[in-house]
Image (cartoon, rainbow, N blue to C red):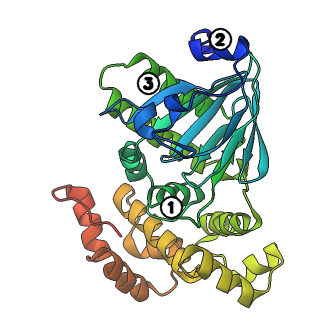
Amino acid sequence: MLCALAEITDEERKFLAGEEKIDRDIYMAEEGNVISVNKMLPHGDLVAVRTHSRFVDFPEHTHDYIEVVYMCSGKTTHVINGKTVVLKEGELLFLSPNARQRIYPAGEGDIAVNLITRPQFYDGALAMMTDEQTPLKKFIVDSLAGSDTGAPYLLFEVSDILPIQNLMENLIWGIFNKVKDVRKINSTTMGLLFLQLLNHTDRLSYTSDEEELVLKTLMYIDGHYADGSLTELSRLLHYDYAWLSREIKERTGKTYTEHVQSRRLSKAAYLLKNTDIGVDSIAEQVGYENVSYFHRIFKSSFGITPYKYKKAAMTQNEPLPAE
């Protein structure tokens, strides 16, 4: 597959022949520097693969879609919102529509693949993720909502994580070769990729001090929802307790306690659905010492009691309510 992706395109031949500027008509629908999904993606398709154009300085631009860049070989140098980002072989870059991106000229051996996506492409992948807030889910949801306050990009340094490499190669191959049932396969593969990336948030490169704070908070909650505390988190991050509490609320829209509660209930729902553990034991396992309070808060969030939720999961006669 790499040989096919490395073939020099007609556009690249022009650059090698001396052309110094991109053809805007290929990428942009009108005046401005916004690359258009309708230009890059055939009508009706949800995702397409396009190799990055080498041998040219790609000027600063934005996108009207989420772009995913996978570095197949070599490296490319990007300037994103004024920050230099070097994408190396095996790494994965997610760009939001609010990201201003410039790309320095790439050499012949620098093979990057761009995934051009419509919003509906992420429906299946998001459905496979749990309800709790995670850095990746927050990025996708913020980007799809057109938020100007979310992270401009996420960089996953995962070149040595074999399952992620295999999933990316499968995704690219499936799109490139237009396999049967391509939509379902691509959606499922992207969902599996998201789940793998969630297991490797320690490989996430931060985009700013503010995003680092949010991501570290969410990662801490994900690992310590049952026994952690804001006091301990403030000590670990070396921030004042009151200041950190305000920042979490301001930057995520939820308090620390609300994030913890959402994560606990999501984990409880998973255990109720997928294990034989008793309801009271699950309550204690996810961090609720007061079992009666767990019952009340679970019913308030899901609309039914934990016992009824577990019974519905066992009989599978009706869809389970979401938080």
Count residues near mark 2 (Cα–Cα under 10 Å), then give few for <14, some for 14-19, many for 20+: few
Q: Earlier in the sequence, mark 1 or mark 3?
A: 1
- Residue 107 left/right relative to 294: right
- Residue 179 left/right relative to 110: left
Three-letter amino acid code at the position of disc 2: Arg
Residue under circle 1?
A: 142
Q: Residue at x 61, y 80 (%)?
A: 250
Locate the N terminus by quadrant.
top right
Residue at the far right: name it: 238
- Residue 129 left/right relative to 163: left
Between marks 2 and 1 in the image, the one whose residue lies nearer the viewer: 2
Between marks 3 and 2 in the image, the one whose residue lies nearer the viewer: 2
Q: Earlier in the sequence, mark 3 or mark 2?
A: 2
Residue 232 percent across, percent down from the top left: 75, 79
Report whether residue 109 is seen: yes
Q: Quadrant of residue 216?
A: bottom right
